[in-house]
């Protein structure tokens, strides 16, 4: 099954946070012990421009609630400004049932395009 598409915009100088709940139908899946990764790439055959993960501390897992919380800090967002190609940058949010082994039963929960927006609101 393909992942739903949800396009995102990263705003200059701002954190990007996202909360996902893993469900089957209406039932929440217990994700205790799961691993997760958020990766942004300009091309599927290139290395990721940014990788956020459970092991790296940018994604937290709330087991019995099925919840994954992603936080990409403003510094990382600003670094991406000069790296992403707005015409082709994509991300994937992938989970797997063992925190250490993404090769075992990985599932993309969400994917989409990545754009960057300047902050015109001032500091």
Image (cartoon, rainbow, N blue to C red):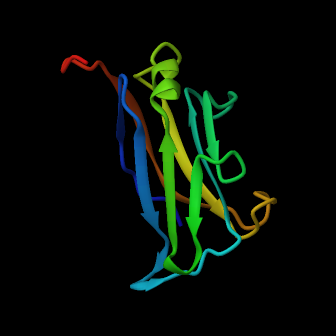
Which residue sits at x=81%, y=59%?
100
- Which x, y percent locates residue 56? 69, 45
Q: In front here: 45 or 97?
A: 97
Q: How many marks?
A: 0
The quarter of the picture where residue 42 lies is top right
> Which corner quadrant holds the C terminus?
top left
Q: Quadrant for residue 94, please give it.
A: bottom right
Residue at the extreme bottom: 27
User: Is 45 left, or right, of 17 in this rendering?
Assistant: right
Task: Look at the picture and state if 29 lies above or below 44.
Answer: below
* Closer to us: 22 or 65: 65
| Residue 48 versus residue 106 in the image, above or below | above
Residue 72, compared with residue 81, is above or below; it is below
Given residues 13 and 22, the one toward you in this image is 13
Q: Residue at x 36, y 42 (%)?
A: 7
Residue drawn at x 50%, y 24% is: 75
User: Percent position (x, y) of residue 49?
Assistant: 61, 27
Q: Is residue 93 left or right of residue 112?
A: right
Residue at 65 percent of width and 31 percent of height: 48
Question: Is residue 112 among the parts visible in the rendering?
Answer: yes
> Taking 53 as reference, is 19 left or right?
left
Residue 30 location, quadrant = bottom right
Q: Position of residue 68 (x, y in %)?
A: 52, 62
- Residue 55 percent across, percent down from the top left: 72, 51
Up-down: is 34 above or below 100?
below
- The furthest residue to the top: 82
Q: Residue furthest left?
A: 121
Observer able to see residue 84 = no
């Amino acid at each position: 099954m393909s992942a739903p598409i949800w396009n995102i915009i990263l705003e200059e100088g701002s954190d990007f946070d996202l909360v996902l709940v893993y469900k089957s139908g209406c039932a929440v899946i217990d994700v205790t012990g799961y691993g997760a990764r958020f990766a942004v790439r300009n091309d599927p055959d290139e290395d990721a421009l940014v990788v956020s993960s459970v092991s790296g501390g940018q994604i937290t897992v709330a087991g019995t609630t099925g919840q994954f919380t992603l936080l990409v800090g403003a510094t990382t967002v600003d670094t991406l400004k000069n790296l992403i190609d707005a015409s082709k940058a994509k991300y994937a949010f992938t989970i797997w049932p063992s925190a250490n082994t993404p090769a075992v039963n990985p599932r993309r929960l969400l994917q989409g395009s990545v754009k960057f927006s300047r902050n015109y609101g001032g500091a």
